[in-house]
Image: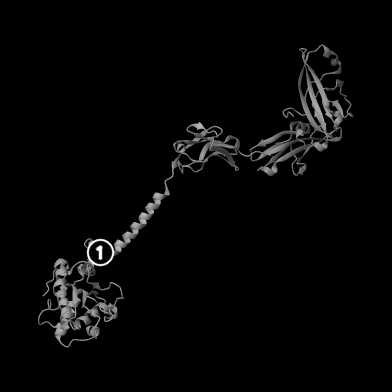
Amino acid sequence: MDTSRLLFFVVMVITASECSETATLQCKNSFIDSFKLLEGEAFYFVPLTLTESNIEISTNENKTVHYHGGALFFLNLSSEDSGLYTGRHKRPSGNCKNYRVKVEVFKASHAMDEALLFRTISNSDVNKKVRCPDPVSDTCKMFNGTWSWKKDSKLLQGEDKDTVWVHNASKDDEGIYTCICTWKHNNKVYKSSGSRRLASTALTVHNKPEIISPTDKELFADEGSGIKLNCSVFCGTNVEHHCHPSWHLNGIPFNNTDGYSQTTTIKPSKNTISTAVLSIEKVSAKDFQTEFKCIGKGSFEISSSTLTLKRRESIIPLVIKGVCMVIFCVLATVLVKYFAIDLALLFRSYFPHRSHYDDGKVYDAYVVYQMQSLNMDNEETLCQFVTKNLPSVLEEKCGYRLFIHGRDDIPGEDHMELVEGRMQQSRRLMVILNPGSGSGSGSGSKITDQRPTSPQNSVIGGFDWQVGLHHALIQREMNVILIQLGDTGPEGYTHLPPGLQWPEGSRGAAAWNSRFWKRVRYLMPATPAKKCTKSAII
């Protein structure tokens, strides 16, 4: 149906007397306008005179179809009123034109048929305007009729104008809207109606194609394995038919070949994202030399992104590196633990202990030893170590200062004051354990508990032990260095005070072996007292 034309088709009037002249007139025929109407409704045309099958229409107002006051009326239409109506317009020049109107009358049960609908309203507006078709609207204005509306045969309350506004239109608002005009003619009530469909069209936005995938320029792959390359393109909103992704290989559009295939999918969403998937069954050496280009075509623009395949590195070198790192760490730990003393001595000169410079100590170690209950060989060994070996290494080579009885004491000085004073001026208490000091009858108790009865005995044991242990174990003023000469015997260190005992198998005492002097140096102060003070020792 042509909705740009009035339902009430307008033509000029021709009279019955002029019909006789049709044989001599050259009249042009217009296009046939078709109108599909419902049975029982009224049909109204503005001024014209029409004939149906060359029979002039009556002017009797009691007829269903009549001409009155320059207008054509179809009142209470029935199926018999269907037909082709022709009107002729004669111009003063002698030319004429035939206007043809085809009327089809349908039963009221066909009111919702698509054939009876006027133009569909379809746009992306948020608020949609539904206007009554012009033929019905003009009739209602002419006869000052009243309005009512239906949506899908259901009455819409409060709608009494020729236009209905649908605010915030959604899918639920879609349907067939029918305007009904009730009007009077010759004191009789008639109805005219027109229907049109409202369709909700989603908002469409065309963007420049944006390549979502691939995002990287390179992709790692294993030769001989399968891989899928995704070319995903975002084109805008609701533009499914204008979003086309594809793959180009070395600048040539891809065509399906053996081992290669391409499929395209569109993600069902408001935002249009289309994806072209290039499937490679087995990656070959040629593929690593191929340039894969993702092309995204939109409505007006084209975007692209290039991708190349790169061989994935084998995991074996990584495993080898990891194993080597573990082995290196284990070896480093073992070496550090084994050479801990060597490392400490090496870095000691670079990181000296500043606290030793201000402690006011004169001696680095106070040497305590015992000569009771020793046979000649052990006594010889002890004397050799105390008087020669110990001073030659620690004092002459390492620069430490030791206090050794019999060598450093002043004749005539009070022995107790001497021991107490020199002990307070020393940083370490160096205890020399004799060979087999743990064995014998009561030798251990003699060392720790027996008080000598003469000053000579005090010089070589007894009081030195008492004062030294008091400072080391009770007052915590100095550290103890135990040096074991020879074997400890079956009793081990059980003869020593509990504070000086070590568990069996430990390295608490510096044993006489190849690393003996390094261990002693490690236990000695980092900075020799000889370098820390210039005080004269009298």
Residue with the most extreme top position = 24
Look at 56% across and 33% down and name the residue there: 299
> Is residue 51 in view from this perspective?
yes
Question: Does 504 sit left or right of 57 as displayed?
Answer: left
Q: Is residue 466 above or below residue 191?
A: below
Look at 86% across and 20% down and name the residue there: 54
Q: Is residue 113 above or below residue 45?
A: below
- Position in image of residue 348 (x %, y %): 23, 63
- Position in image of residue 193 (x %, y %): 78, 35
Q: Residues within 10 Å of mark 1 (few under 14, many from 20)?
A: few
- Could you tell me which quadrant the C terminus lies in? bottom left
Q: Is residue 171 above or below residue 525?
A: above
329 and 293: which is toward the camera: 329
Question: What is the quadrant of residue 521 in the picture?
Answer: bottom left
42 and 453: which is toward the camera: 453
**Amino acid of disc 1:** Ala
Residue with the most extreme bottom position = 453
Question: What is the quadrant of residue 202 in the picture?
Answer: top right
Question: Does 339 sit left or right of 39 as displayed?
Answer: left
Question: What is the quadrant of residue 118 in the picture?
Answer: top right
> Is residue 533 in view from this perspective?
no
Question: Does 179 sit left or right of 247 as displayed?
Answer: right
Q: Which residue is mark 1?
A: 344
